[in-house]
Image (tube, rainbow, N blue to C red):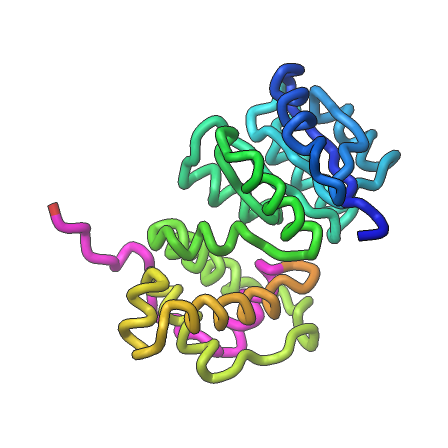
Amino acid sequence: MLNPIRVLIIDDHPLFRQGIRWSLSDADDIEVVGEAENGQEALKLTELLHPDVVLVDINLPGLNGLEVARVIKRRAPRMGIIVLSVYEDDDQLFQAIKVGASAYSSKDVHPEKLRLYIREVALGKYLINDVVLARPVVASRVLHQFRELASSEDEQTSELFAPLTSREIEILDCIARGLSNKEIASELNISSQTVKNHITSILSKLQVNDRTMAVIYAIKRGWIKMGYNAEDEPAPAE
């Protein structure tokens, strides 16, 4: 590509930042344009350097990674954010979704996979959604919160988003019931790949400017059912 993907690394450990820089050094289409060791420095550098993708450690001292991500997305909605954590945690994943992160990964991610994440996020894709949809408990929690938010009187979304197709509505409702991709495929008698393709389409429509408000709009318009409550799920078998 003519213009390499501009990456900013935010982590308080110099050795880890150096390791990421080294792992990206052989990718001709990726350029590390800066490093920050804390949240305040990171916010200044995003304003100064205008990176395409930001890699941020979730456990920064002071202003933590989630708070940094939230501010960045408010200031630059199109800037891609990859949240990195020492270990993958459902609550952290849920919070990363809320602040608008494009991807969430453990810090032991393979360098080649990290390069792939950066390339996909730079294209505007939300890889975090695939992680969520593979974890029914998190997916249920996300959709349950959307329903609570949908009960508000906020009408900012009045004419911003196009309706989903009937099949997309079916799949979105399955997600609301906490079904995995495989379970959705079985219930609708389609392939897992077809489910994934539909989900990609759904999330593309729901992430214009603000994915959360897009889903709230869908619920308000009755595109997916309101009756489901995450608390009504049967307890998992022992």
Relative horizontal placement of residue 227, taking residue 124 as reference (left or right): left
Residue 190 found in image quarter: bottom left
Q: Position of residue 21 (x, y in %)?
A: 69, 27
Nearer to the camera, 24 or 143: 24
Identify the residue shown where x is 69% and y is 73%.
160
* Outermost left residue: 238
Q: Start and end of the magenta stretch?
A: 211-237
Q: Residue furthest bottom?
A: 166
- The x and y percentages for residue 151 are 50, 64
Horizontal placement of 40 versus 181: left or right? right
Q: Quadrant of the C terminus?
A: top left
Q: State the image coordinates of residue 217 (x, y, percent, origin top left).
A: 57, 70
Near-viewer residue (142 or 129): 129
Q: Residue at the spot x=79%, y=52% of the render? A: 1
Classify residue 194 by image quadrant: bottom left
**80 or 173, nearer to the observer:** 80
**Closest to the observer, 1 or 36:** 1
Q: How many marks?
A: 0
Is 233 magenta? The answer is: yes
Which residue is pictured at 46% across the width and 62% down the height?
147
Residue 201 lies in quadrant: bottom right
In the rendered view, would you say 13 is above or below 58? Answer: above
Q: What is the x, y in percent for residue 196?
A: 45, 66
Residue 193 among those drawn in magenta: no
Q: Is residue 101 above or below residue 209?
A: above
Residue 217 relative to residue 173: left or right: right
Residue at x-position 79% and y-position 28%: 34
- Residue 190 versus residue 192 in the image, above or below: below
